[in-house]
Image: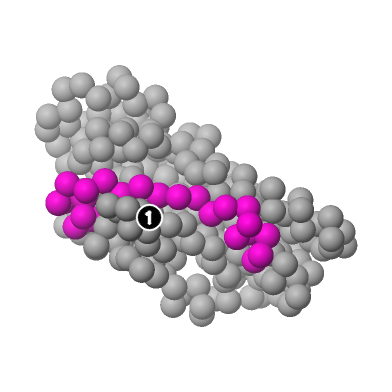
Amino acid sequence: MILVADSCSDIKSEDLKKRNIEVVRLSITIDDVEYTDQIDITSEEVLQKITEGHRPLTSQVNPDEFESLFRELLERDNEILYIAFSSGLSGTYQSSVIARDVVLEDFPDAKIEILDSLSASYGLGYTVERASDLVNAGESFDNVVTETKEMLTTIRHLFTVSDLDYLAKGGRLSKGSAFLGGLLNIRPLLHVEEGKLVPIEKHRGEKKVLKSMINKVKDEGASGKAYIAHANALDTAEKLKELLLAETKIDEVKIKLIGPTIASHTGNGTVALFYYKQ
């Protein structure tokens, strides 16, 4: 079987190659110039453009691109699993469904499973990596699909951002209007609900919002590995890592830079934590 991810998983290109994961890439437009995610532009470049006052715009993968990919992959294998960027944040998932239905008319015996991850960044990437481990261990197609579906019910995303207004203007924030006033020195805490970013708490200062993250990890009995993704906020990410290792059952933490597409919507100062609840 062939595992497919998109660039919003934030997995680096070299890691995708090592794991034999196929990838479709969203695009980013800045000042009328279009860039392919992770190919033509880096996270650092996107964040610098934002610092300079530019507003990156992102574009979903269209059905024609998916149709071409699926037809190409079916020449190699009859089983394809695509774990998609949240349908609540992009139309990419829907594009893939349209393409799959067209392709299956010509290849009715093929298996093309598409899972809406309702996830973003390393919330998606972590699940893709675990699915890849199952594929590489020789698990059957049906078992990989079943276990991946279960993973997607237990992955957790916690975010804090320095500029909630920037996130809201990008249109990817749900239920955010009540949080937009009086945010001076306030750090909001967000999670993912039905695939959309939703503010859930306000905290005065970084220390308190990180403590709230830690408490939620404890409450859900999380253990093992966690990922932290950040956008020009390495110091805060390192503080969160120290707290996780000192105060929770998490015993491995990997810190990553948020990918170009996701960074286009979060802006600078974002720190996100991803883990599986017990």
Image coords of residue 261 (percent x, y): 38, 54
Image coords of residue 34 (percent x, y): 37, 58
Q: Residue at x 63, y 53 (%)?
A: 63
Image coords of residue 50 (percent x, y): 21, 50
Q: Is residue 66 magenta?
A: yes
Residue linked to disc 1 = 28
Residue type at mark 1?
A: Ile
Does residue 179 appear to the left or right of 39 in the view shown? Answer: left
Query: Where does the magenta region start and end?
Result: 47-69
Does residue 51 appear to the left or right of 13 in the view shown? Answer: left
Question: As drawn, which residue projects farthest toward the front?
Answer: 32
Decide which of 136, 45 is in the foreground and name it: 45
Residue 222 visible somewhere in the drawing: no
Q: Residue at x 76, y 51 (%)?
A: 101
Decide which of 32, 21 is in the foreground and name it: 32
Does residue 151 appear to the left or right of 1 in the view shown? Answer: left
Q: Is residue 246 above or below residue 76?
A: above
User: Where, by quadrant of the figure, is residue 44 drawn?
Assistant: bottom left
